[in-house]
Image (cartoon, rainbow, N blue to C red):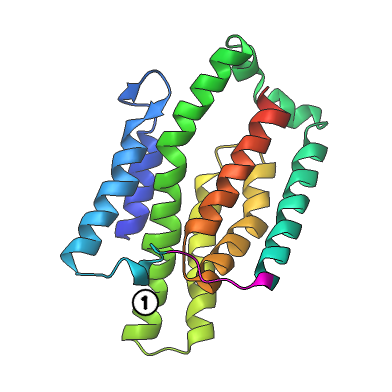
Amino acid sequence: MGSLFLEFIANYFASYFLVWNSFRTVIFLVFLNVPALVMIFFKMKASEMGIRWPNFKRADIVCLMIVLVCISAIIAVIRYNTNYQASYTDFRNSGTIGERFVDFWIFTSSTLPPWEFFHRSFLLFGVFYILHKQARIDENLSKAIAILFVCAFEVLAHFVKPLYEPLGLLFGSPIFSFIALRTKSIIIPLIMHLYIEIMFFVFILS
């Protein structure tokens, strides 16, 4: 319930206390500071929360490249959906491409790292740690529950956006979380999330 409350606060008050008109101060503080304080209070190791260099094999790299190619293809196709494009007409008309570029990356810098830290580190690894390490539940079952738990949070948070985005997260969120647990790190999902933001700006917002 506490995590759900944080999700509500961060998203409901996201438009308040903006810096440079785009930096989401509330999201940045709530999704970063509160989980960090909880982790420090309970003496949770950073490495057990996915804050470490990823542990992956060569085959994993090939799979990641395939996933990135698929993501690029999906975004490129969505670009030609007029209903989806219409959802971001106001932003595309808000200034020059240079001004939009600066606004978008100020916004992204305030939301992307905190988002991955809260959902992939605090929630995903936190739930897995509680279920598997403390409750002694089967490892694979603990991972599945944690993945579904995070997916529910991410999909619900995107219901205010165009339908394609929450639908996409029904598939994207479990993939990101699976990769995080497999590599024991949030770094690869964070990089993939950044890649999606780049593709989003190039194909949709520019």
**In the rendered view, does 193 fall on the left or right side of 187?**
right
Seen as rendered, the residue at the extreme front is 58
Does the segment drawn in magenta span residue 4?
Answer: no
State whether residue 93 is above or below residue 124.
above
Q: Please tell me which residue is depicted at 39% across the width and 71% down the height of the picture.
A: 127
Q: Please tell me which residue is depicted at 19% across the width and 69% down the height of the picture.
A: 42
**In the rendered view, does 190 fall on the left or right side of 200?**
left
Residue 142 in the image: state x and y as whole percent.
Answer: 47, 80
Residue 197 in the image: state x and y as whole percent.
Answer: 60, 38
Does the segment drawn in magenta span residue 57?
Answer: yes
Seen as rendered, the residue at the extreme left is 41
Residue 39 in the image: state x and y as whole percent.
Answer: 24, 63
The foreground one among 187 and 84 is 187
**Which amino acid type is shown beneath numbered disc 1?**
Tyr
Q: Quadrant of residue 18?
A: top left
Seen as rendered, the residue at the extreme top is 95
Q: Quadrant of residue 161?
A: top right
**Mark 1 closeness class: few <14, some 14–19, many ≥20 residues within 10 Å:** many
Quarter that holds the C terminus:
top right
Mark 1 — residue?
129
Report the predominant secondary structure element of the magenta stretch. loop
Q: Which residues are magenta?
A: 53-58
Q: Please tell me which residue is depicted at 16% across the width and 64% down the height of the picture.
A: 41
**In the rendered view, does 110 fall on the left or right side of 176?**
left
State whether residue 129 is above or below residue 93.
below
The foreground one among 3 and 110 is 110
Element type at marker 1?
A: helix
**In the rendered view, does 201 fall on the left or right side of 76?**
left
Residue 184 in the image: state x and y as whole percent.
Answer: 47, 71
Quarter that holds the N terminus:
bottom left
State whether residue 9 is above or below residue 104.
below
